Amino acid sequence: MNELAFWLALSRVPGIGNGRIRQLKSYFGSLERAWTSTAHDLTASGLDERVVGHLCDARKTISPECELENLRKHGVSALTADDLLYPNLLAQIPDCPPVLYVRGELPACDRLKLAIVGTRRLTSYGRQVTGEVVSDLVSAGVVTVSGLARGIDTLVHRETLERGGITVGVLAGGLDTVYPAENLALAQRILERGALVSEHPPRVKLRREHFLQRNRIMSGISRGTVVIEAGEHSGALTTARYALDQNREVFAVPGSMFSRESKGTNRLIQRGEAKLVLCADDVLAEFGVELPREVAGALPVMQADSVQIRLLAEMGSTPVHSDELARRLDLPSQDVAAALTLLELQGIVRNLGSMNYIVTGRWRPEVS
């Protein structure tokens, strides 16, 4: 039988990780022999009594052949830690998953990958920062990695795809189920320009502890982790701590001292655990990467009429509602909404939700 089947089966045994699978393979010569060996021989190979018990119990309910069929049924591929396609950075962490389950196409190992994480309760500030940072990172060829969770994670994936970039979603459960369910359509879009990965095979029940465990994979795949907004007890801080333990770069975007969602990022910076980020260049510089000249250089000319120019003169980096703009300029609300829509299509302004807008800053006017 295919040796992969026994990687799949053994990786599901409690207490058996990448190191013990290699230990078994070295001792028995093949994982098939290890799977079928007696408890006495397993003990002789170096496994402790508890793990031997787990393995013997697992053989009653786990079939290596059925594990392979489970992957075929759900259209999932599996990379073992011995596979040349297994992410090289992930293979370097001490507790790397012995098997990585994949849907889609993983980007090449030499592509710069950065994990971008944050709170599920993002503010308008977090939405603005995520859009600006992700846009520039994608322009520089960065592959983004995040967890497909609500909030910052979702926005990272969406912004990457909208700018034609490649993104990797790391799921806490098996790849047959997307959580939260509202991100199912987003997950399908990711598969068109990236990949979904997990350390769990299809049909594994999602457990609370899986969410924190998957964070080590996000940081492990990436050369650095960027935390945009995170409260003091945010799971995003776990990703940052994993990155520090893995000797990877950690970056954090500062926020207001009054914002609960910035307390975690501010603490990371205060303790010297993260480099302060004011723009994407602060991240890229650590890896010797520069923004393309068309992004970093001269600003594009914007075709704008007098209403649009007046609107932009009233706007800045602080979100403002379209109704407030109409009031300030004494213009009909429908005219302001139409002008903002045209500006948004040109990438000059960004809708942060609920008709609150900011200026992206990348423009110079040419009045028509």
Image (cartoon, helix red, strand yellow):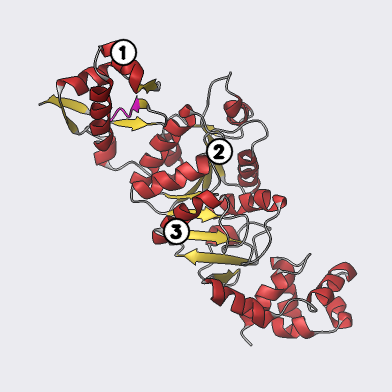
Residues under labels 3 and 1: Cα distance?
42 Å
The amino acid at mark 3 is Gln
User: Along the horizontal axis of the image, is 62 left or right of 162?
Assistant: right
Residue designated by label 3: 188
Q: Is residue 313 above or below residue 52?
A: above
Q: Is residue 141 visible?
A: no
Residue 189 pos. (x, y %): 41, 56
Residue at the location (37% across, 41% down)?
135
Q: Are marks 1 and 2 in contact (CB under 8 Å)?
A: no
Q: Which mark is residue 118?
A: 2
Residue 302 pos. (x, y %): 18, 31
The amino acid at mark 2 is Gly
The magenta region covers: 358-362
Q: Secondary structure at mark 3?
A: helix
Q: Which quadrant, please, contains the C terminus? A: top left
Q: Is residue 129 above or below residue 48?
A: above
Residue 51 pos. (x, y %): 84, 69
Q: Is residue 120 visible?
A: yes
Label 1: few (<14), some (14–19) or many (≥20) C-alpha neighbours in 10 Å: few
Q: Nearer the viewer, residue 182 or 279?
A: 182
Q: Which mark is residue 327?
A: 1
Q: Nearer the viewer, mark 3 or mark 2?
A: 3
